[in-house]
């Protein structure tokens, strides 16, 4: 059986042009290398899976002028995982290695991952070397928690802050990989995977591999991805809003019951409903439609539903959903809390109509409550 290589390794960038969503970092690093102005101590900060270690390896290759797949690459890169090698002794061993110039190329590059895990004693042992490294040594420190790195280390490094990768950028990258691998994949499915990854490309690639394995050659579909990732379908929210617009009291409750029977959490449902209402509001103005992180096909559905949804009604519903969200954890009967919010929403339209015909304010309050 042929060895399977996960996509996160198979498609790891080998050049700055392949790094996704970090143009502000890659442009700066490329210019620094081209102009021979690269600092000897760099600190890469940011969430997991956004390209910190990848960029560190690219820097190591470019400053030495090695080919992409050169065997000498590994001889000039020394990687230390500070999560499991965080003692003074580990750092002293590293400092001892720094004393010897490289056998190949111009620079030795030391990549210390999760540097915030070093003990205070290890940090202090490292300070002098970091401040005055040999001309051939480059230190690249990587961390997901910059606030845990001591100030004396921060002051000796050039700091690069990596961003969470945009959903649209992850989705485009997954589409390229799917096309390269000859795997049929629906855009909505790739967008769903990108959303679930929460800004981490490595997580997105892992989920993509999982979906491809599940599909067993049939392609990555929206429905199968929804089922596997246990995500609530957009269509449920569109149906609930349609029912609320028609002042149907029972249909939202029936749909909510169906959602619960499928194993979804009531709190997640109300948070999702709030997000849906927010998207309906922003889709009513062409200038704010880009604030929605949903596929183009879903944006069109929002635009259609938004046309029949008065902003005042949406704002009232959003306020009710938000109150339910705030109070949900403290409720003893959480299902009833969500059902009550849905029933109030179904009643709001009638109240607003009565308001239009001039019913007294006190009578309106009684009608809603």
Image (cartoon, helix red, strand yellow):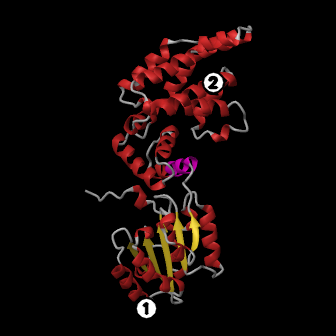
Q: Position of residue 8 (x, y in %)?
A: 42, 58
Determine the residue located farthest toward the front in the rendered image. Answer: 362
- The mark lying in front, picked from 2 and 1, is 2
Say whether residue 232 is visible: no
Residue range corresponding to the magenta coloring: 167-176
- Res 123 seen here: yes
The residue under label 2 is 316
**Residue located at (55% from left, 81% from top):** 40
Q: Nearer the viewer, residue 84 or 29?
A: 84
Residue 150: percent from left, percent from top: 50, 72
Q: Residue at x 69, y 25 (%)?
A: 311
Q: CA distance from mark 2 to mark 1?
A: 68 Å
Using residue 85 as the reference point, say whether residue 233 is left or right of it.
Answer: right
**Is residue 348 located in the magenta-colored stretch of the structure?**
no
Quarter occupied by the C terminus: top right
Q: Please state, as top left, top right, bottom left or bottom right, where the N terminus lies in the image.
A: bottom left
Residue placed under numbered mark 1 in the picture = 99
Label 2 SS: helix
| Horizontal side, residue 337 vs residue 304: left or right | left
Taking 220 as reference, is 356 above or below it? above
Circles 2, 1 touching at the beta carbon (< 8 Å)? no
Q: Secondary structure at mark 1?
A: loop
Instruction: Please tell me how crowded label 2 is: few (under 14), some (14-19), or many (20+) other residues with Cα within 10 Å.
Output: some
Residue 272 vertical position relative to residue 254 in the rendered view, above or below: below
């Amino acid at each position: 059986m042929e060895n399977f290589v996960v996509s996160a390794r198979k498609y790891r960038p080998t050049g700055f042009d392949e790094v996704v969503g970090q143009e502000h970092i890659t442009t700066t690093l490329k210019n620094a290398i081209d102009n021979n102005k690269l600092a000897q101590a760099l600190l890469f900060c940011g969430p997991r899976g956004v390209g910190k270690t990848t960029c560190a390896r690219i820097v190591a290759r470019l400053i030495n002028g090695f080919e992409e797949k050169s065997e000498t690459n590994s001889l000039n890169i020394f990687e230390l995982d500070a999560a499991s090698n965080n003692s003074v002794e580990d750092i002293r061993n590293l400092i001892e290695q720094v004393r010897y110039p490289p056998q190949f190329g111009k620079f030795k590059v030391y990549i210390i991952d999760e540097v915030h895990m070093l003990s205070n004693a290890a940090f202090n042992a490292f300070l002098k070397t970091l401040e005055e490294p040999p001309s051939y040594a480059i230190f690249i420190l990587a961390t997901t928690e910059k606030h845990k790195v001591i100030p004396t280390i921060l002051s000796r490094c050039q700091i690069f802050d990596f961003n969470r990768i945009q959903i649209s950028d992850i989705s485009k990258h997954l589409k390229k990989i799917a096309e390269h691998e000859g795997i049929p994949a629906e855009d909505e499915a790739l967008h769903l995977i990108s959303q679930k990854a929460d800004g981490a490309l490595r997580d997105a690639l892992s989920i993509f591999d999982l979906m491809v394995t599940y599909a067993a050659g049939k392609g990555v579909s929206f429905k199968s991805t929804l089922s596997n990732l246990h995500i609530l379908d957009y269509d449920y929210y569109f149906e609930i809003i349609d029912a609320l617009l028609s002042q149907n009291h029972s249909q939202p409750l029936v749909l909510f019951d169906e959602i619960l029977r499928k194993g979804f959490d009531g709190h997640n449902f109300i948070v999702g409903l709030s997000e849906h209402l927010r998207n309906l509001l922003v889709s009513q103005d062409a200038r704010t439609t880009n604030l929605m992180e949903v596929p183009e096909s879903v944006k069109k559905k929002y635009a259609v539903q938004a046309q029949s949804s008065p902003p005042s009604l949406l704002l009232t519903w959003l306020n009710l959903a938000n109150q339910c969200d705030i109070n949900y954890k403290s409720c003893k009967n959480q299902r009833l809390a969500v059902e009550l919010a849905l029933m109030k929403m179904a009643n709001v339209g009638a109240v607003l109509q009565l308001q239009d015909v001039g019913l007294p304010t006190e009578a309106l309050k009684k009608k809603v409550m």
